[in-house]
Image: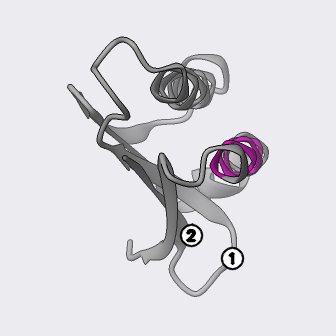
Amino acid sequence: MVTVELYSASGSEDPAGFKVSGHTGTSGESIVCAAVSSACYMAANTITEVLGIEADISVHDGYMRVTVKGDDIPKAKAILLGLKLHLEQLAQQYPKQIRILFSEVHQ
């Protein structure tokens, strides 16, 4: 199962980042895992490379964490809301393979 944790800024509903962990099925063979991974990489790359926002990023096998800080949170809002929508729709299609959690990130 893939677990997605979507972060909001402390005391706000504005999205501030996400953490994704786990796999569905055999690594490299699941369309669900590939869809989640692709969406998360696109969001992370758009935030850092296209928008030029500094983000705290950690990536390794089956794990990605991206956190945007402070004044940059509003700049990344549209990308993170788009990611949230995309992942929620995937979770509706594949409820046994994707779990979404929500939490605050304290900065």
Residue drawn at x 56%, y 17% as measured from the top left: 49
Residue 85 lies in the magenta-colored region: yes
**Magenta residues: mostly which secondary structure?**
helix
Kindly identify the amino acid type of the residue bearing the numbered disc 1.
Glu
Residue drawn at x 53%, y 26% as measured from the top left: 48
Q: Position of residue 37 (x, y in %)?
A: 48, 26
List the single residue furthest toward the left.
60
Of the image marks 1 and 2, the number of the one nearer the N terminus: 2
Q: Position of residue 59 (x, y in %)?
A: 26, 30
Rendered position, 22 above or below 45: below
Q: Secondary structure at mark 1?
A: loop
Kindly identify the amino acid type of the residue bearing the numbered disc 2.
Ser
| Residue on which the image places disc 1 | 13
Residue 102 visible at all: yes
| Residue on which the image places disc 2 | 8
- Residue stretch in magenta: 82-91
Rendered position, 31 above or below 20: above
Q: Is residue 4 left or right of residue 9?
A: left
Q: Secondary structure at mark 2?
A: strand
